[in-house]
Amino acid sequence: MSARDRLERALERLVGASRLERALISVASLVLAMLVGTVLILVSGRMTTCTPADAAYYFGVGFCYDPVVVYDRLFLGALGDPLRAGWSPLNSQLAVTLRETTILIFTGLSVAIAFRAGIFNIGTQGQLVVGALATGLGVLWASPFVSGVVGTLLLIPLGLAIGATFGALYGAIPGLLKAYADANEVITTIMLNFIATGVTLYLVSDVFKDPNSQANQTVPLPEFASFPSVLFGPSTDFSLIALLLGIVALWLLYVLIERTTFGYDVRTSGLQPEAAEYGGVDAGRTVVASMMLSGALGGVGGAMYVLMILGKFQTGVPAYGFDGITVSILAGNNPLGVGFAALLFGVLKSGTTVVQFATDVPPQLVGVLRGLIILLVAMPEFFRLFGRRIVDLGGSGPDPVATDGGVPHDDREADDGGTDDRTAMVADDVAGAHGEAPDDAVAGDRAADDPGGGRRE
């Protein structure tokens, strides 16, 4: 067997892995990343000078950096040291972890919905920035008309709706260019990221600038226009209500993708666009709708950033949109998996700051450790997504994934396994989901080939 055959076989095996197998692969990748990181920490510790009392000794050799302490601070530190006496689940460091997780849920969902439709949306960061600025300005304009608890109940939904609307409109631009001008969405979304950053910088530094601040920011929102703190202290800039909204969004998007006609169109277009077109799916409309939903979720993430963390809009928004790409890949573009991936990413982001303040490890090495963990954990899922395209298009791999949830229809395939027949059958499935009859000619061809009259058993 040649090396290429072995590679194809490995890709086929990875593509066909069950959810349990994929979870075990992710755990194994995390362990491997920690082992490699341990070697880097020890090697770096040997290249650094420290007193014998500050060194950690392994195998009789002193190292200036202790990998056990580093990983303890990275993971347990992000949770507020749950193994130490006096630990409280309402500590500020856990609030930081959950705060990062909340924003990453929305950016991860934003990227995932586009990826499921076969669209590479690299523009979630720009959609988040646009949604954040629109939310800040819209809520600031409406805040004089209300106050108190009533103001909170009205302004929070208003801000989220504004962020979603402007994020969707900004996402519609690359969607329209992709659907009707055949423009590469990777290029257009990247360019729109720069446009969003530049335009918002101009507006905030000139038109809407807070006259009482040297920073490029809008006037701060009133206190009642922000997410109320529940259980955690106000200084943590975290609200359990926002996290609960994120969890609800995970479930709603999962239902939308897996249980509705629109989700059926999205999955079919992402897996087998030719079959989807044959079955009556409007590919252009699906692309635009998917990009608008993706942009809306990114815009809600921006609204959360303004209404929960900052209480205003300020330039220099963190790269939540780009982090969402990694979160989505790590989750396999599964909306429910996005929640776990966002939590892992939130732990790493929060724990990184703890390592920097609680140890002598340089921040550059901490960044390498964090990147190494993310890379090795996400890489198997990335190869699985890449392998699906290779296997599906290669002809020698497994049969194309069916559009009714991923179960192959082996019993319906023609004897020769022809691609055209499989495409026609998938197209019929899509047409059936829309209440349409399958193509009569194709049905006739199957009846001729099937001694049983073309009936599907």
Image (cartoon, rainbow, N blue to C red):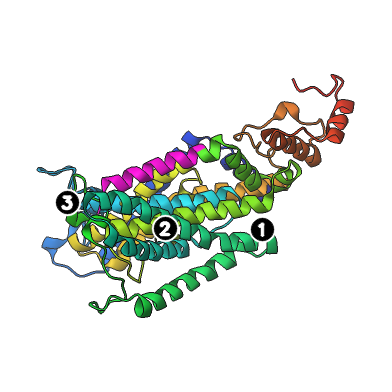
**Residue 452 sits inside the magenta stretch:** no
In the image shown, does 161 or 395 lie closer to the viewer? 161
- Mark 3–mark 1 Cα distance, whole angstroms, equals 47 Å
Residue 126 appears at what percent x and percent y? 46, 65
Residue for badge 2: 163
Mark drawn on residue 233: 3
Q: CA distance from mark 2 to mark 1?
A: 24 Å
Please name whichever residue, 404 or 244, is drawn nearer the observer in this view of the structure. Answer: 244
Q: Which residues are magenta?
A: 238-255
Residue type of the residue flagged with mark 2: Gly
Residue located 60% across and 45% down the image: 266
Disc 3 is placed on an element classified as loop
Q: Secondary structure at mark 1?
A: helix
Residue 179's label in the rendered image is 1
Quadrant in which the N terminus appears: top right
Q: Quadrant of the C terminus?
A: top right
